[in-house]
Amino acid sequence: MNEYVCAFRGRRDNYQVPLALAEVNLLDQFITDFYSLSVSQHLFPYLPQHWQQKINFRSHPGIPSEKVYCLLGKTLQEHLRHKLGWSAAKTYAAFDPVFSQQAANRARASRSNLFLYTPYAWEAFRASYSHTPHKVLFQFHPHAEVEESLLTQDLQRFPQVEHSYREEVGRDLSPVARKREQECWKYADLILCASSFTRDTLLKAGAKPESCYVQPYGVNLPVLSNSSPSTHFQALFVGSGIQRKGLHHLLNAWKQAILPEESQLILVCRVLDPGIQTMIAQTPKVRLLQGVNAEALGQLYQSSSLLVMPSLIEGFGQVFLEALSYGCPVLGTRNTCLPDLGGESDGVFLSNVGDLDHLIHQLEHLANYLPSHANIRTNARACAERFSWQAFRSSLCRWLQSP
């Protein structure tokens, strides 16, 4: 079987796709932006500690360094554009095609197959080749047309989230940039989706069921400390404070819900929509945390009664699995991975999408239900155990090796 070229920026999915390919000797080349190769390791002892942490984060011992090709120049250009105030969406739209074109060039030279994520597939899938590469698409986000429809309807109810709305749906992008992400699935031989909801949005767009499958993500089970959950109701939100994540719905519901007196909502957000930031300041019993490291986040999962993220639309929602791995029950919508993970006996609870009254009801119900059902935390941990990264990688390779 021919090897595969894989390409993406950053540390997407903890490098699990190129790692899966490398483990079964199917990785021809992994194309990325910054990756900790041997040259950076030589400089490692002379760098500040925070840079050492970044370098360590951008590598995986299971991926041979000789299989990695870095587009470092594009990384520097991206950071410069961010400093100059360019939007992330415009910057990615400008540079994503470069990763795709490089994947096409490599596939031509090595006569390899292609295993690409949605933003990096358009040019490579549509290129001309002297061979016939197998084209595998990993669709980690729902179809863009479904997302835009949902978020546009929500914006009419909550105009204060317009900032993150414009960034998310790419309203400032060219028609070509929007088309390359909306239609690249049409050129794939095999489509793997992170959740059933994501697959449903592609089927609605016209994808064939026989070539479009669900492959949920995984999680590494952490070692739990001896700390106990909070004695009062503590809800936790982890994610970007933007419209798509439904934080504005959660804040409205939290303000109206009748909860025990000592209840607290903790928000862990790296970025915030300005309109949502204003809402946070106006909502009682809310604590905002930014710059939380992995160890502190693990403690929050263990001490919290419930993770709440009422996303309007989500390709998967990795924080749900992370929370479950710490024994923390979760509450989210059907437009996520949650229906694929389990049910209420597993600590997985659902709220109707965009339904404020139902979200209020669920918060009130769980504030009283969870303290009297301590075994739910054990069940939540067991639920996460069924979704290991090793299982993800093994399943991924079975898709490639099946006829």
Image (cartoon, grey):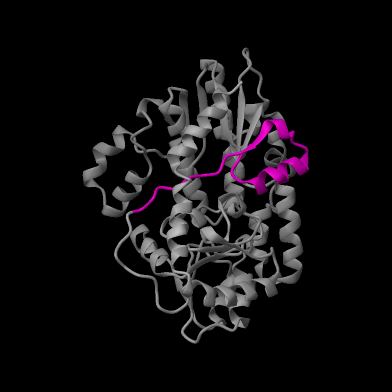
Q: At which x and y percent is residue 24?
A: 43, 24
Quarter holding residue 135: top right
Start-end of magenta stretch:
193-222
Residue at position x 43%, y 67% from top?
Answer: 290
Total numbered labels placed on residues in the image: 0
As drawn, which residue projects farthest toward the left? Answer: 45
Q: Position of residue 70 (x, y in %)?
A: 43, 33
User: Which residue is depicted at the point 52% across and 22% down?
Assistant: 106
* Residue 65 drawn at (x, y percent): 36, 29
Q: Is residue 44 left or right of residue 69?
A: left
Q: Residue furthest top?
A: 130
In front of the other: 158 or 44: 158
Q: Quadrant of the C terminus?
A: top right
Q: Is residue 69 visible?
A: yes
Q: Is residue 331 left or right of residue 211?
A: left
350 horizontally vs 24: left or right: right
In this rendering, is residue 354 above or below 317? Answer: below
Any part of residue 178 in sight: no
Give yes or no for residue 196 being in the magenta stretch. Answer: yes
Residue 96, position in %: x, y?
58, 39
Residue 259 lies in the magenta-colored region = no
Front-most of residues 131 and 388: 388
Q: Nearer the viewer, residue 381 or 173?
A: 381
